Amino acid sequence: MVPELNTSKSKKAVLLLEDGTFFVGKGFGAAGKTSGEVVFSTSMVGYPEALTDPSYKGQILSLTYPLVGNYGVPPYDLNYGLPLYFESDRIQVQALVIHELCLEPYHWASTRTLDRWLSDEGIPGIYGIDTRRLTKKLRTHGVMLGMVKVCEAGEEPNLERLLTEAKRIQDPNLTDLVKEVTVKEPVHYKADGSKTVVLIDCGVKFSIMRNLLKRGISLVRVPYDFSAKEIMEYHPDGVFLSNGPGDPKKCVKTIESVSELVDKVPLMGICLGAQILTLAVGGDTYKLKYGHRSQNQPALDLNTNRCYITTQNHGYAIDTECFCRTPLEPWFINVNDKTIEGVKHKTKPVFAVQWHPEASPGPYDTEFLFDTFKKMMEVA
Amino acid sequence: MPKFEWIKKVLVLGSGAIKIGEAAEFDYSGSQCLKALREEGIETVLVNPNIATIQTDPRLSGKVYLLPVTPEYVEKVIQKEKPDGILLGFGGQTALNCGIELVKSGVLGKYGVKVLGTPVSAIEDTGDRERFRQAMLKAGVPPLKSKPATTVKEALDVANEIGYPVIVRVAYTLGGKGAGVAHNAWELREIVTRGLVQSRITQVLVEEYVGHWKEVEYEVMRDYADNCLTVCNMENFDPMGVHTGDSIVVAPSQTLTNREYHLIRSTSINAIRALGIVGECNIQWALHPKSEEFRVIEVNSRLSRSSALASKVTGYPLAYIATKLSIGYTLPELINKVTEVTTACFEPALDYITVKIPRWDLQKFKNADRHIGPQMRSVGEVMAIGRCFEEALQKAVRMLDIGKIGLVGNPEDEEPESEESVKEVLVNPTDERLFKIVKALKMGISVEEIYRLSGIDPFFLYKIQNIINMEAKLRQLRLRDSTAAETVREAKRLGFSDEQIAVCTGTNELEVRQFRKTAGIIPAIKQIDTLAAEWPAKTNYLYLTYGGDEDDIEQSPGKSKIIVLGAGVFRIGSSVEFDWCGVNTIWALKKNGIQEAIMVNYNPETVSTDYDVSDKLYFEELSTERILDIYEKENPLGVIASVGGQIPNNLAMKLANAGVKLLGTSAEDIDVAEDRSKFSALLDKLGIPQPSWSKLTSIDEAKGFAAKIGYPVIVRPSYVLSGSAMRVAYNETALENFLNLAAKVSRDHPVVISKFVDKAREVEVDGVYDGETCLIGSIMEHVENAGVHSGDATMSIPPHTLSVEVQRKIEDATAKIVKALKIKGPYNIQYLVKEGEVYVIECNLRASRSMPFVSKTRGINLIELATLAMLGKKFEGLKTCGLPPTPHVGVKVPQFSFMRLSGADPVLGVEMLSTGEVACLGPNFADAFSKALQSAEFRIPPKGGSVLITVGGEEPKRRVVPLAKAFEEMGFKIYATAHTADVLRASGIESVQVLHKIKEESANPNILDYLQERKIDLVINVPMGNKQKSYSDVLTDGYIIRRQAVEFNIPVITNLELASALVDVLKKRESNGNSICSLNEYMDELPWKLW
């Protein structure tokens, strides 16, 4: 006789959007209800990295690749004092939306299933829905607020009530999401090298830290609301502005600090960091219709015409028209929608990119930017 | 950087005939290349003798030369055409090797022809194992531990150093030809001896064997400005050890983590940068299954089978973009053809999974080894798209057209088999491995155990277990059960066909269809858009899935739509010629104002599955169920099932019964032609002679009938192509065996026995009928007498021995049959001619294998006319009837791949064995035949060469005498076996030298030694007519001679008529090949050209 495979006890689940659209599927992970901004990523690999990326704070993440969980979930093993396979020490998304959940994963590094991981960390997940239909909806209407309800086994979702609730979801972008993911107290990370960088943690991905540490740069990871004065007390060789969730304009204190720091130290920013830098020097940012979340975004260097494949995860972008007011100039643009992908200061050793040169998940093609930053510090 | 302005004219080299390891994928890449060049206003010249391809259409290619892709002929074309640049990367290894020789011999330099794209130095780095290894080490890319060897002794030393098992690879060969795994010195010695002979540079590589590591591939693009990206990665279901061409492949990779995926991706890019590739290439990796350790295996510095697959997997037109990069463009300057707004400088994101499965035809070959390993043996492949692995896998299994209704639910699944024999196949895979995994799981062998034995990742094995579990669930189910809808929905999601569900639940296919439609279980149409729905797609590259609930496209009901059914999987007997027919039908529909010409096909190697050929492409199964699904969604004017060969033809009746409107000849009339019994009755009624026949009702009756008409007899099942299970029986025992076989191949249709007419001429007619005008494209005469399958025969246009009177008889019979069958569209009729009498043997109411050959040689596009007929239009006004013969001669020659099939006997018979064909045109038969032979890799024996003649039977021995005399007169050295030599001497050929049979090992001189020492340039070996003998004793001397000749790449001729035609070629050696004319020139001189 054929052995039966483990099938997770069928839990009903539903994803509802603010406009009343809903998708009925099966639940996994933790039972419960959560809401947030519904976004999609077209990455085909890297769910352990993506789910732990603090930039997803406040968001319900839908993956367009239909088979998820194939290689299980690795352990939180440490490397440079940081979990090697993850971008933070916990799952950051509000909920996960996928087409098919792998119930029998296999990989030498795996210690548990995706289902188990979400359940261990209290995160609800829904699978078995037409994620392509969802993606097309978000592409057409722009990102929407939504809600995921995962029932207990045997429980039926009360659709009527959930639909009413879905119309009243609070937009997480109106809150200070960075506050939820930033480090509470300064933390020191020592590397074998002479340079020290203060990392302003707006929800930093561990791979950024790993990239700096492996280049012999010691780090002081400070909360996002540290003042320029507090930062300069560490006598840093450079300052790093991390990625993070939500609307950059909510990071009022960070913007203020950065506006002072620009003239004082070499500075590099990533993603939210790029937006904060722009705002700090008088530029502007705006919300994209449905953001860039994928590993295949083309970033063109306007000076050399070289194009790089980049990994991205952002819902806000730098306004193109504001440059005349700032000391910044565009460095990279996205070849597809011509949005700004990188900026640099006209006179100072300061630059930032909208994508993630630290990859993870995604291609490593632009890791050289960390070398550029290191060189800047050496020259300065 | 925009394109180079100095490029005005480019020469493109094709890949020649379809052979194992080099198939229709190069028609696809070449066609895209030509399209990309011509839209830049660049003049193109193509050299490719594969007349059945789409790229050899002057409308696509500018100038077409149907000539061998050899340095000798390409130089002549260069001399005439004076191109500015040459592209070597679009015609497989054939084009690459030819190009390297042209560079080395200084020809390109002499005529100032620049190699565009990847420089020759990079090609050489990738072709020579040691150079490759050094280049990789320099770039920090880990290669396999290995060392080259040029002698057996050296190889043994290297193997001792690395440790067994080792794999031996041969430099510069196609599809891993000659490679093998050696577990000990004895095996190594044998493999190396053979490999050294096959290598162009007498070199083999001995390297560490990484069997059971994961095999992963990346397709990489790079431009002159050093922008670099990977379009697609693919993971082999079969681990290292099985050639990637023979592996089941999934894309994108399924079991790689982000780190594994991107570490290998980055290293791929480093490797390609270091090599200096410009354009496209494929890079293969072995990844350790328990760590992040990996090794680079090889780089194909050209478009490949994998790149064609990757194009279809992603929708990214690799060959098209590679061409643009070769002429100077950079990636960010180019547009993604699918969205028409985003850039080509990106990496496609997929929201589906694809599964490729190869198709083998090993059972057709007598004595052929059925194991799969480092040497590629498959002849075709299919690709299925789904939203889960199970769905894609089951679709792909059905697409193979090997009689399986899916992965499970097949009657033969339950045949008892010992655990040992199943495990044996898991360890040493054969073409049936996938089905043995199912058996193993059903036997209760654990996933871990199967993994240990086979090296197949448990991820995939668990998915197969899911399918098995669902089968078990369905077998408990009745459609009236309350949970039936839920279970059927899940079964459909896992790729179960209606037929599979019907088998499991004890009902029939249509009932299941009705049930699920009532329950609202219908598939959704999804689009392949390269960006996982992030941007809207402008193209209609579509598939159907149960993993979704919304169609991506909106139907436009007012439009005129026609669905064309493609050829499906290629196998021996059905290949690129049917793709030519399908694509030409689409073009003709567009020309005739049809608003949506819709293609359904699933063969990733083809042009027809290029999304910009048709208005809509459904990359889907050719099954009744799926065509009905599409038909119901699209509501077209009708379906064309007569241009894709046997698969769509077999569907015609079922579709018609299900209410589908078929365009062209009615299903009933097709049935009359296909059902041997009905067709024979029709011929009797028309008074057209045919060989005596009888329909089989019982084996005893059949024996009685055969005894009455006298042996030999032909046993033919209905509804088969390429003579599958068609056999000549020389006695009663053989007859009985064949009948059993035939019954198994075609359960639904009767079997017919007919008299085998000995020493008859075989003739074919291809044409089109519109209901009023019977157009005969051409009469083709086979060079070989009847008895050789028409797909393996050498054919000539015009017929070279038939009298005018016989030709008239053939035309009359053709007209009568065509009218009686009320044909509307293409037809093909096969005749025997003996002593002035004409007999009909077969009639096909569909496009035939020879249609492109006839169309191009005669300058009349038969498919375009057939499409007119199917649309109900008439030929009136077209100058197409009673055409005189063409002033030129066209000769079509088969291409065999025996070298690739260890053990296969190269003797020709009624079962088709060739993998491809070529055709060349010339002022006379000898010229055209000479070119065609060389195009099919037949080495014409040199002047003053030597020939070994060994002929069985008294009568053939007598017939070979004049041939031997001709060889003697031309100064050939003649060797023969003792009995043949006696006959030759008795006829006055004194110079003949006797070689001893291989069996007489100690007797010198021995044939085997002479073959090995290459003292023989040609083998003429005609086996005894009575084949029954060779079946019982596979190791006859004749077989060993033929096989050894194949192994040592010495041409073998097993047919006297063919030998005689070759003598004709050799006699006119001096004038052959002097005329270098393009197909355009040949066509333009025809006053009736219709193209």
Image (cartoon, coloured by chain):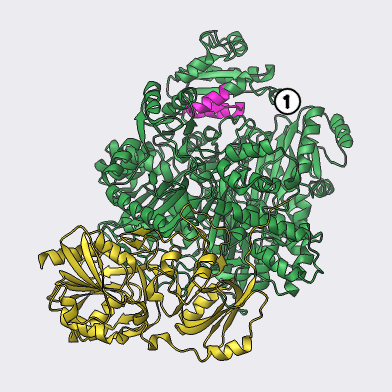
Regarding residue B322, the answer to whether it shows in the image is: yes
- Say which residue appears at 63% left-offset and 39% top-offset: B423
Residue B798 horizontal/vertical position (percent): 58, 42
Which region of the structure is painted magenta?
Answer: B1041-1069
Residue B753 horizontal/vertical position (percent): 80, 38
Q: Examine the residues drawn in magenta and state their main secondary structure.
A: helix
Residue B702: in magenta span: no
Amino acid type, callout 1: Gln
- Say which residue appears at 25% left-offset and 46% top-offset: B112
Q: Secondary structure at mark 1?
A: helix
- Tell me the chain of label 1: B
Residue B1049: in magenta span: yes
In the image, farthest residue toward the left: A380
In the image, farthest residue toward the front: A185
Closer to the camera, B226 or B495?
A: B495
Residue B826 horizontal/vertical position (percent): 65, 55
| Residue B900 drawn above or below residue B1089 | above
Q: Which chain is green?
A: B
Q: What residue did someone put label 1 on? A: B1028
| Residue B89 drawn above or below residue A294 | above
Quarter of the figure that contains the N terminus of chain B = bottom left
In this picture, residue B915 sits left or right of residue B46: right
Quadrant in which residue B510 is drawn: bottom right
Residue A268 horizontal/vertical position (percent): 22, 72
* Colour for chain A in the figure: yellow
In this picture, residue B53 sits left or right of residue B698: left
Closer to the camera, B728 or B879?
A: B728
Regarding residue A366, the answer to whether it shows in the image is: no
| Residue B293 drawn above or below residue B997 | below
Quadrant in which residue A158 is drawn: bottom right
